[in-house]
Image (cartoon, rainbow, N blue to C red):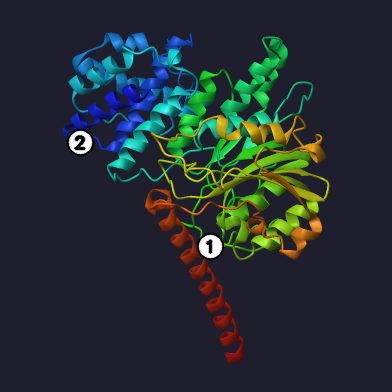
Amino acid sequence: MTDVVGKLWGFCHTLRHDGIDHGDYIEQITYLLFLKMAAERGLDLSRVAPRAPRGELDPVDCSWPALRAASGQALLDRYAEVLRSLERAPGVLGEIYAGSQPRFKSPANLERLIDLIDEIEWTGLGVDIQAAAYEGLLEKAAAEGKKGAGQYFTPRVLIQSIVRCTRPDPRGQPGFALCDPACGTGGFLVAAWEWLEAEARGALDRETADRIKSTAFFGHELVARPRRLALMNLVLHGIEPRIALGDSIDAPPPAERFDVILTNPPFGTKGARQTPGREDFPIATANKQLNFIQHVLTILKPGGRAAMVLPDNCLFADQAGAVFEILAEGCDLHTVLRLPRGTFTPYSPGVKANVVFFTKGRATEKVWIYDARTGVPSITKKDRPLSPAHFAEFERCYGDDPDGRAGRQAASSREGRFRSFELREIEEREFKLDGFKWLREESPDDAGELPEPEELATDAILELEEAVAALGRVLALLEGGAKAADA
């Protein structure tokens, strides 16, 4: 996959002369990749009937072979017609290509890109290849400091581990619904379907499979391009998803309620200075991650379970204790996984994060914490990449019960990484879960073992952001007092 991304990225520089920037180029690739992979998977796009204000337009051949056969100005014209027709198509196809515009001025450049894509059998490279190519190109853009490369994504290894623990199984549950309210390119949703296929071992009957594919998958995504990729990825798996575009925590909550929620809300505080006016949020805060927790509490069904990736600062930030107290009262917050340093390399290697697992409908009695960080070398892209081995022992300790109740009294780990804490101990710490540390970090013997500069910088930024937020609240209180005095 690395070689493929490198080849596609190399051609990106050629397109600068065609007035196509990095973001537009990545978007055009996604349009074309979908057509090529649709052909490989046998999806018939040869007679797409676009919607029209007054009846139906004539069907248009939007298939990859038809596009591949054109050349010169006829290729540019056909490509524009294909995008226009797909944008007007009913259902998910229309959602995928909504707002699509051709960006190529030179037919030779478009033809060269089609040749690059055509020479590879993409479905043979593995699953979720659309997202892998997209993320690889974004990573290249980030390395060159290009605008628009600030997005980063949950590693597949971590997603698959979370899915194995939570076991989102819709079989035997006609109303089952799975949601990711910050779905990005759809990694959690795709992994959930792949897990189910593997779990069923070929015994998933057509009626059950069709029901699950057409009714079980939901998402919400703030940014249009990742949402487009999520739709593409799921459609190529035969799934008919419902993925809304917009801000999950700013909009009113959806009418649907979900059996399982798997999500990695966006980290950081950019664009989070405003407190959402949601009546279902008992704690008013501008912290995005704390608001996502409250959002998940609203949309999770009684008895439903959730797994959320949250940065360290979300466990100790001002108002974090109040949000986690509410969470512990209404849910069994049974497990916290402390992730290795550098889990989100290369996008944000300094971020420290956790996964919290909880089930709605019964109060927390104890919290089990697995420390996969202390004494573990930081993840790096080349020398120490994230692998399934990083989570194998955690999964064994987690157990077979997705609600975290399977024989944990006897659970142990070779290095004592899995430990439980009673509710009383959590209350004593005001529900701030970052303080539960029992393993000793070995003292670094040389500078090579010191934290990475990105990690130190990230820690400093998080502390400064928390300080600024606290000062903002103090100023608001002072301004409120001054206005009351003037009145």
Label 1 sits on a secondary structure element that is loop
- Residue 337, horizontal then vertical, whole percent: 64, 44
For marks 2 and 1, the one nearer the N-term is 2
Counting the numbered discs, the total is 2
- Residue 427, horizontal then vertical, whole percent: 76, 62
Between 316 and 195, the one nearer to me in the picture: 316
Q: Is residue 298 visible?
A: no
Q: From the image, tell me which residue sits under label 1.
A: 274
Crowding at dot 2, Cα within 10 Å, few <14 / some 14-19 / many 20+, comes out as some
Q: Tell me the residue at 40%/52% (across/down).
A: 446
Q: Tell me the residue at 18%/32% (across/down).
A: 18
* Vertical relation: 334 (above or below) 458: above
Residue farthest toward the bottom in the current orientation of the protein:
486
- Residue 9, horizontal then vertical, whole percent: 28, 29
Q: Is residue 373 visible?
A: yes
Q: From the image, tell me which residue sits under label 2.
A: 19
* Vertical relation: 226 (above or below) 108: below
Residue 230 horizontal side relative to residue 431, left or right:
left
Q: Quadrant of the C terminus?
A: bottom right
Q: Amino acid at mark 2?
A: Gly
Between 227 and 447, the one nearer to me in the picture: 447
Q: Tell me the residue at 63%/38% (across/down).
A: 262
- Residue 128, horizontal then vertical, whole percent: 49, 24
